[in-house]
Image: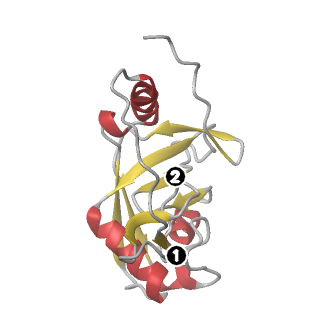
Amino acid sequence: MPKLKPLTRLCDGIPIIEAKEPLSIEVLAVDKIGADRKNPMKCVFAKACNRLFDGIASFYKHVAYVELPDKTGKRKSYVNRFRLKAEATRHIIEYDRTGRFKPGITIELLPPPATNALEYLRQQKHLDKRGPNMKKYAKRKPMRFDTSVRNGTGSLNMSNFHTDSDGDT
C-alpha cells in the first residue's frame, strides 16, 4: 500500500488532534444569549464551551471540536476532536429542530476510538477507492434531503432521505 501524505486539518488556522480524555460540559440558560440554531459554532453547546474555556468550539451531530486551555490557562496550539454520546446527539437534534433545550443538562464528550480517528478513516477511504472489487453503481434516483440537522461534513444529511415511487423528488 502506498504511503499517504500527512493530513493537515485546520480549525480557524489551528490543527486538530484526537482528544485523549473525556470532557463534561454543563449547558446553562445564559448560553442561549446570542445562540443560533443549526450553526455549529454559535449553538448553545458551543456557547457553553466558549463560556467555560474561552476558546474555539464547534458542535456537529456526532463530533465536537473544542479548544482547551492547558493547566496554566494558556491556549494550546491545537483543537481537540471529541465524539458525542447518543444522548448529546439527541440534544443537538432537538435544539436544531425546535430551538429549545433543557438548561442545566450535561453533555459528555468522549475521545474517539481508534477506528473513528481522522487518520484511520482517511486510510480506509483510500483503500475503498483503490480496491480490486470496486462496485459499479447504476444511476441513482433523485433524492430529497433532510436539511433540518447539520452533520459536520459541509454536505446535507442523507440519513433520512426519501424518494417517490416514480423517481421524482
Which element type, helix, strand or loop, lies under badge 1? Answer: helix
Amino acid at dot 1: Val
Residue under the image location 37 percent in, 70 percent down: 160
Q: Nearer the viewer, residue 56 or 4?
A: 4
Q: For this view, does 126 lie left or right of residue 56? A: left
Identify residue for label 2. 65
| Residue at the (47%, 55%) spot, across then down | 64
Residue 53 appears in view: no
Q: Which residue is mark 1?
A: 44
Q: Could you say where residue 53 lies in the image, as x and y percent from the top left?
A: 55, 58
SS at mark 2 in the image: strand
Q: Residues within 10 Å of mark 2 (few under 14, many from 20)?
A: many
Q: How is the image coloured?
A: secondary structure
Q: Check the image and report above or below for 143 versus 67.
A: below
Residue found 36% across the figure and 35% down from its top: 135
From the viewer's perspective, is 141 left or right of 72?
Answer: left
Q: Is residue 139 visible?
A: yes
Give the Cα distance between marks 2 and 1: 14 Å
First in sequence: mark 2 vs mark 1 = 1
Q: Observer-nearest residue: 122 or 95?
A: 122
Left or right for 18, reference 22? right
Give the residue type at disc 2.
Tyr
Q: Could you say which quadrant of the image residue 15 lies in?
A: top right
Nearest the viewer among 83 and 27 is 83
Q: Residue furthest front?
A: 166
Q: Residue furthest top?
A: 2
Residue placed most toward the observer, 161 or 134: 134
Residue 119 location, x and y as percent?
A: 45, 30
